[in-house]
Image (cartoon, rainbow, N blue to C red):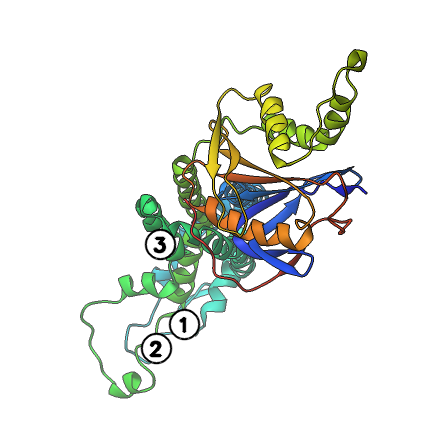
Amino acid sequence: MRFENRPLRVHEKQLTSVLIGALHVSISYPQVFAKSDAFVNCILFSLKMNDLIPTINAIRQQLSGLMENYHQELIDIAGQLDTTTDYNNYFERIWQGGWARTDIAYYQNPNNQHQTIQVDANYFYDFLIKQTNTDVDELGKRTYTIIAEFKKLQTHALTELSLIGDEEKFANEVLLLEKVKDFKWGFESTAFIKTRIPNHMPVYDLNILSRGGLEVPPHLQAWGYIQSLKTKAVAPVNFSELLTQLLRQVELKLPRRNLRTDYTEKILFDVFENFHLSCRQLRNRHDNRPGFEVNDEYDVQDLMHAVLKLHFKDIREEEYTPSYAGSATRVDFLLKEEQVVIEVKKTRQGLADKQVGEQLILDIAHYRNHPDCKDLICFVYDPEGRIKMRLGWKTTCVNFPATKCP
């Protein structure tokens, strides 16, 4: 009976469980990358420990997509808003009213210099459309829509990168993460209007102040909003630069992964997938010579060690005496440069679905704190078909406290 080879790629952030028979083994979220039609006499999973590289790459890709979609549009919005700059002085000149006065909303009639008209802020927005073809209201709506997309990424990044807060070595990056959290998406119009309020002003009618505070001239309401939009139009670019810096700094402090290439991954996958065929071949030797029989776990370990020597230079034997009952000292293999530990098991009478699952719980806990283990791979050789779950490992979400990894 053959079983599907299901390597499980694990990320420490999300927690699920592997279902082995009736037993739950708490690990992180698995992503199956084996071929769905690959059936071999072994079962495999890989435990990622504190690997933020996929998370960083995903956030970086999302950020790149947002900038590609909206960067030029934001530049265009800022450029259109700049065309209104010269008209602020004109609005100031035609203003006939004054602060804290009843005529605060009165302006010179453009069609008759001897008359005044009472207007609101919309008058100036309409004026700018006619004079510069700049629809401030539409530009504002578009700017806020774009910022909303960046804010979604901001929330996502804060959640995914919150893990670095538990690591002392990321102290500087935590400060950057706080800046990302507190990032200001431009200034509000009130910030600009405050700069135009005079320090001293005569008040002729105290009832004006009692009707809800100091009223703002309509042209300054429009001007303040335009100035606010200018800062908001450039905010996503500033946010992009800040988030890019944070991602890069975190990336530089993560364990070096240049030796753990896709090639290494493929080699291990091929070794595991073809292991049973190798065992069968060794039983049938040339000229009727005695065959090499794989009878127990030690035989599996010896053969696995020999095969790994063909592909990896620095293989360390890790002696480990498990705490489960009746267990002898076992030798696991550490691929030093690749930071991968390979644990080898062979099923036998009394060691099938449930027992393997119970052992894996303890083995995973043991290697979580291993300084050189960034991936834990458990190779279970099952030539007799003692594990009855044809689909191998199944996953189901559980609530389990995260274990801190190096």
Q: Residue at x 60, y 57 (%)?
A: 17
- Front position in the image: 251 or 141: 251
Where residue 222 appears, as percent x and y from the top left, is 43, 63
Residue 291's x, y, as percent? 74, 21
The crowd level at tag 2 (other Cα within 10 Å; few <14, some 14-19, many 20+) is: some
Q: Residue 231, relative to residue 397: is it above or below?
A: above
- Quadrant that contains the C terminus: top left
Residue of label 2: 103
Instruction: Give 232 or 87, whichever is nearer the viewer.
Output: 232
Mark 1 to mark 3 CA distance (whole Å): 51 Å
Above/below status of 275 relative to 321 = above
Residue 375 position in % (x across, y down): 53, 39
- Amino acid under label 1? Thr
Label 3: how many Cα within 10 Å (few below 14, some 14–19, many 20+): few
**70 or 286: nearer the viewer:** 286
Q: Which residue of the protein is positioned furthest toward the left in this rendering?
A: 200
Per the rendering, the mark at residue 18 is none
Q: Secondary structure at mark 3?
A: helix
Label 1, label 2: how many angstroms apart (C-alpha)? 10 Å
* Amino acid on which the number 2 mark rests in the picture: Asp
Q: Sequence-wise, which precedes: disc 1 or disc 2?
A: 2
At label 3, the amino acid type is Glu
Q: Which circle's residue, 1 or 3, is located before the other in the chain?
A: 1
Callout 2: helix, strand or loop? loop
- Viewer-side residue, 155 vs 119: 155
- The quarter of the picture where residue 58 lies is top right
Q: Quadrant location of residue 142?
A: bottom right
Q: Which residue is mark 1?
A: 116
Chain-order first, disc 3 or disc 2: 2
> Is residue 83 visible to us here?
no
- Check residue 178 in the rendering and tell me which mark sits there, or answer none: 3
